[in-house]
Image (tube, helix red, strand yellow):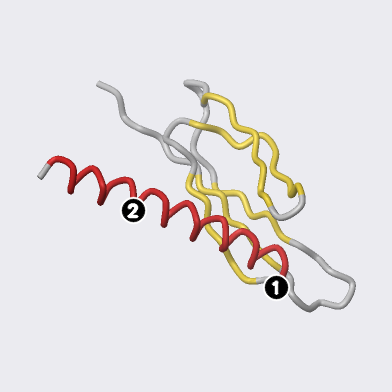
Amino acid sequence: MKKKILHIIVTTAIVGTIITGCQQTMTKNFGGDMTLELEPNQKLEEITWKDDSLWYLTRPMRDDEKAETHIFMESSNTGFFEGTITVIESTEVTE
């Protein structure tokens, strides 16, 4: 039973990774919208493409900062296949 549960977890993680990778490629090459939710208490510093991979730089959120939403948009010469990536920051309440 434990092996079956582990197999389901691993399979779900692999499929999620493949779907996320495909979504990045589709957004970059054919336009569309994608949402990226950062880990709690992380701030977005920078975001860019390297080939078909999306790279983003984060840092720990400072105590005086609030979570924000960032929109990373492509503006092409033709207006076709423009993509938008929405990056969502969040805070985790610690007690």
- Position of 9 with respect to 70 (left or right) is left
Q: In this rendering, is residue 90 above or below 83?
A: above
Out of 86 and 67, give the one closest to the viewer: 86
Question: Quick one: 8 or 45, which is closer to the camera?
Answer: 8
Query: Which residue is located at x 74 percent, y 49 percent?
Result: 49
Badge 1 crowding class, 10 Å Cα cut-off, few under 14, some 14 to 19, many 20 or more, is: few
Q: Is residue 46 above or below residue 33?
A: above
Q: State the residue at coordinates (59%, 67%).
A: 33
Look at discs 1 and 2 and give the one toward the viewer: 2
Q: Secondary structure at mark 1?
A: helix
Q: How many marks?
A: 2
Choose between 65 and 72: the one closer to the eye: 72
User: How far across and down, in percent of the image, does residue 86 sit?
Assistant: 58, 56
SS type, badge 2 = helix
The label number, if any, that marks residue 38 in the structure image: none
Q: Amino acid at mark 1?
A: Phe
Read off the residue under disc 1: 30
Q: Quadrant of the N terminus?
A: top left
Point 18% across, 48% down: residue: 4
Marker disc for residue 12: 2
